[in-house]
Image (cartoon, helix red, strand yellow):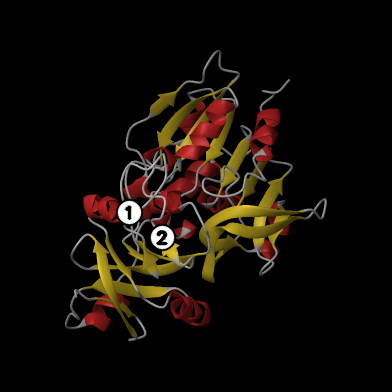
Amino acid sequence: MEKAYLILETGEVFEGKPFGAAGESIGELVFTTGVVGYVESLTDPSYHGQTLMFTFPQLGNYGIIPLDAESAKCHVKGVVVHDHCDAPSNFRCQGTLDGFLKSQGVPGICGVDTRRLTQIVREHGVMNAIITEKVPENMLDQLKNYKVSGAVESTAITDPQVLLPDGEAKRHVALLDYGAKRSIADHLLAQGCKVTILPYNATADDVLNLRPDGVMLSNGPGDPADNPGCIAQIKGLIGKLPMFGICLGHQMLALAAGAETMKLKYGHRGANQPVRCVRTGRSYITSQNHGYAVVSESLERVGGAVSYVNLNDNTCEGVDYPDLGAFSMQFHPEAHGGPRDMESAFDRFMNMMGGNN
């Protein structure tokens, strides 16, 4: 029987069985608590450079459904799961998880104790790990030296794209692509917006010359502070147009406003993350995928107010900037996969642009 190994930066070794592509891969090991939505997770650009472990015990039981994909390719470096299903059953299925990972050149390992692995990550924090079919020499040096870099430019588009809604456009939105999920544009189109998607390195003048009614700052991978050009771009747009930031866009909007961000010990990833609205006290279940957060205490001095908090660790999950005509959310109101509790955020953005009048 073929064997595969998952080796952690701490030196711990987990033995399992290989599936997906052959070979080895180093990535930052993170875990997601979602029960479903693995197609969306694997194709989410925010996972660039990371090895994704699923805490749900079985993966692949409904196969690969291309219409659920959030981008054109798999962005994870590797997949870790307890049980891999190679006989999926779903009327929308168009392939197996194993076949998909093979086509994308992404290795996987199954048959490992994902409960124990999750405990290790929760205890020590995210760490680098390698999936391999043989233990390489100088393995720990390789792991310690690995760093996710150039994340945004590796996932964003390079040329502008224009998407049109069915019927006459109510409003025109400039969507800045830092590694955007497809569902963000889909929600804007469903609201009746013309969407111009711009690459991450577009300037503020490039955006303003389009004369849009509002600006959407997308999700994306990596450390928000690693993107000084994007932060400068946002600084040039704040207060000039209605603005809505999601995930990485939320974090970089905070940095552009003068607030701070921090790295979380093991992040929030999954389709079952609870948040509380500060204004109403109402709780929502949300879809999340982030390893960094805005420092709540840094917002007051820049005119920002925390709008949502995470009920697990009380970190910032949303910010309002009332004097700047901007707001942002750390979680994903577009969901996919996950609950649709917060889709009303897109209605709020439309109202800011006068699109629902």
Q: Secondary structure at mark 1?
A: helix
Label whose residue precedes the other's in the sequence (1 or 2): 2
Mark seen at residue 97: 1
The x, y position of residue 155, in whole percent, is 35, 47
The x, y position of residue 335, in whole percent, is 56, 46
Q: Looking at the rendering, which quadrant does residue 65 occupy?
A: top left
Q: Looking at the rendering, which quadrant does residue 160 occupy?
A: top left
Q: Residue at (18%, 78%) from the top-left corner? A: 134
Distance of label 1 from label 2 (alpha carbons): 8 Å
- The tally of labels here is 2
Q: Residue furthest bottom?
A: 11
Relative vertical location of residue 17 with respect to residue 75 in this rendering, above or below: below
Depth order, front residue of 238/172: 172
Q: Quadrant of the C terminus?
A: top right
Q: Residue furthest right?
A: 280
Q: Is residue 222 left or right of residue 238?
A: left
Relative vertical location of residue 61 with respect to residue 157 in this rendering, above or below: below
Q: Residue furthest top?
A: 168
Q: Residues within 10 Å of mark 1 (few under 14, many from 20)?
A: many
Q: Is residue 30 left or right of residue 108?
A: right
The x, y position of residue 7, in whole percent, is 30, 79
Q: Which residue is mark 2?
A: 59
Three-letter code, disc 2 = Leu
Q: Looking at the rendering, which quadrant does residue 274 occupy?
A: bottom right
Q: Residues within 10 Å of mark 2 (few under 14, many from 20)?
A: many
Q: Residue at (58%, 62%) from the top-left corner? A: 293
Q: Secondary structure at mark 2?
A: strand
Q: Is residue 357 left or right of residue 295?
A: right
Relative vertical location of residue 123 with respect to residue 76 in this rendering, above or below: below
